[in-house]
Amino acid sequence: MKICCDRAKFLEAFQVVASVAPSRSPKAILQNVKIEATEKVVVLSATDLEIGIRCEVAGVVVQVPGSAVVPVTRFGGILRETPDEQLEIEADNQGTQVRAQRSVFKLPGINPEEFPDVASFKDDAYHQISACFLKEVIHRTIFATDNESSRYALGGVLLELGEQELVAVGTDGRRLAKMQGPSESVGGHKTDGATTIVPTRALQLIDRAVSDNEEQVKISSHQNDILVQSEHVTIYARLVEGRFPNWRDVFPSQEDNIKIALPVGPFYSAVRQAAIVTSEESRGIDFTFGEGNAVLVGEASETGQSRIELPIEYRGDPVTLMLDPKYMADFLKVLDDDKTFSLEVKDGKSAAVCLTDDGYGYVIMPMARDR
């Protein structure tokens, strides 16, 4: 193999791919990235056997097709530290050589045949989704997942793929985020009630690897894994095993709820201010809505008190509930500051439901008060 590449573009792709390779593994081969060069394209791939990625690299001239396996740390260091714009990479049975204008690096040879295959996208049935919408779905649901729980199903986002709609749900058992929007089924692809829980780490990789400039992304879900393909990247991930909560039962009935319109930016500022005096032991904040005001009160014996007032449109009878400000802030920070949302509450003991006009819903369970 012999290629000449644009160092900056190669480094950008390498860093995304290398993030999949484990820093420690019983299988030392997994701590590397594979380079495959054909006459038309160069593909970088990595896997930890649970998640895999294949990424086409731009700005590469292939002089001799072939393949090489390079160590993440040392090869990545060469790409980062070498100042030249162009690099020549050549590999044979003896090893890999990286040549710049005034420097040469030689790395030991690793047999490319020993590197595990990373799945490519060959499915005829899949869902087609806007890349921008998919990234927004990830941002609005991933924060609500729980990778620390013994309930493994909470460590990922549930994807329900219908004929013309995608529904994504993340929860840790104390709050739940749901985003839905348009998607197109190709070849009759749909999940058909199967539990498609995509691990949080795979979603983080998809968000990083898929460019905002890309128009469409393909998603193909199988019984135990999922494939995601954009213009230059293919990502494979094993699905999370376990039983996901019935999220439709978690969303409370909204018929009798009090509906309160709130401005995102000012309310987010009020939440951050009220949270200043909270502590791990006393992290709850009293949210009171009524008579034209939202009043946020925080109090902890060891850290002090806070009281923040914000004028609002709701002028009905006051209703108070105690919420974790972090959970409310997590919701608000994925919204645009100049937007508004609807907060729906029944009473101080029931869940708070936050809704936007673009298919986003968020449920927060209230905190119990100390007797």
Image (cartoon, rainbow, N blue to C red):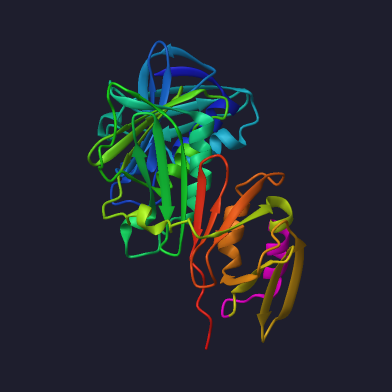
Q: Please identify the residue farthest to the left as the structure is shown.
A: 223
Q: Nearer the viewer, residue 150 or 133?
A: 133
The quarter in which the N terminus is drawn is: top left
Residue 73 visible in rendering: no
Is residue 276 highlighted in magenta?
yes
Q: Position of residue 106 (x, y in %)?
A: 46, 32
Q: Position of residue 261 (x, y in %)?
A: 65, 53
Asked which quadrant contains residue 96, the reply is top left
- Left-right relation of 290 to 144: right
Is residue 119 highlighted in magenta?
no
Q: Position of residue 242 (x, y in %)?
A: 26, 55
Magenta: main secondary structure equals helix
Going 44% across and 43% down the picture, which residue do you hit? 203
Residue 256 visible in rendering: yes
- Left-right relation of 171 to 320: left
Q: Is residue 75 above or below residue 57?
A: below
Q: Nearer the viewer, residue 77 or 131?
A: 131
- Left-right relation of 199 to 83: left
Q: Which residues are magenta?
A: 268-281
Q: Is residue 69 above or below residue 287?
A: above
Number of numbered markers: 0
- Left-right relation of 63 to 276: left
